[in-house]
Amino acid sequence: MPNCPKCEKPVYFAEKKTSMGLDWHSGCLRCERCNKTLTPGSHAVHQNKGYCHKPCYATMFGPKGVNTGGDSYSYTQK
């Protein structure tokens, strides 16, 4: 039985969400920046970490000034 990459506890079939080639608990598959729950297949990945498309991924890794609403979403990279 695979372990969740976030909490490292076993992931049972009834509760698993598969994303980025790994099995997750549905509550553990969250955006690394804003902690929003992610849906498998509809989020962005950067360096094996999941991010919501807007505003987190677009602001952090996309072209500056595009799809970010000006300076309203201003994050600093860790």
Image (cartoon, grey):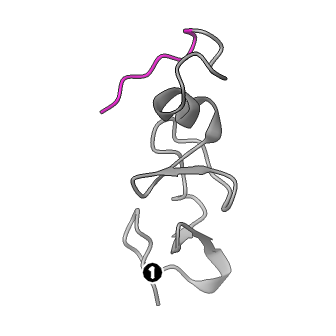
| Residue under the image location 68 percent in, 60 percent down | 41
23 falls in the magenta region: no
- The spot of residue 28 in percent (x, y) is 51, 59
Vertical relation: 11 (above or below) 42: below
**In the rendered view, does 3 fall on the left or right side of 71?**
left
What predominant SS class does the magenta segment belong to? loop
Give, as a single range, the part of the protein colored magenta: 71-78
For the residue carrying disc 1, how many other residues have a C-alpha within 10 Å: few (<14), some (14-19), or many (20+)? some
Vertical relation: 3 (above or below) 63: below
Q: How many marks?
A: 1
| Residue under the image location 47 percent in, 30 percent down | 60
The C terminus is located in which quarter? top left
Q: Which residue is the extreme one toward the bottom?
A: 1
The residue that label 1 is drawn on is 10
- The spot of residue 44 in percent (x, y) is 58, 49
Residue 51: quadrant of the picture:
top right
Vertical relation: 62 (above or below) 27: above
**In the rendered view, does 76 fall on the left or right side of 13?**
left
Three-letter code for the amino acid on which mark 1 is drawn = Pro
The one nearer the camera, 48 or 10, is: 48
The one nearer the camera, 4 or 69, is: 69
Residue 32: quadrant of the picture:
top left
77 falls in the magenta region: yes
- The spot of residue 18 in percent (x, y) is 60, 72
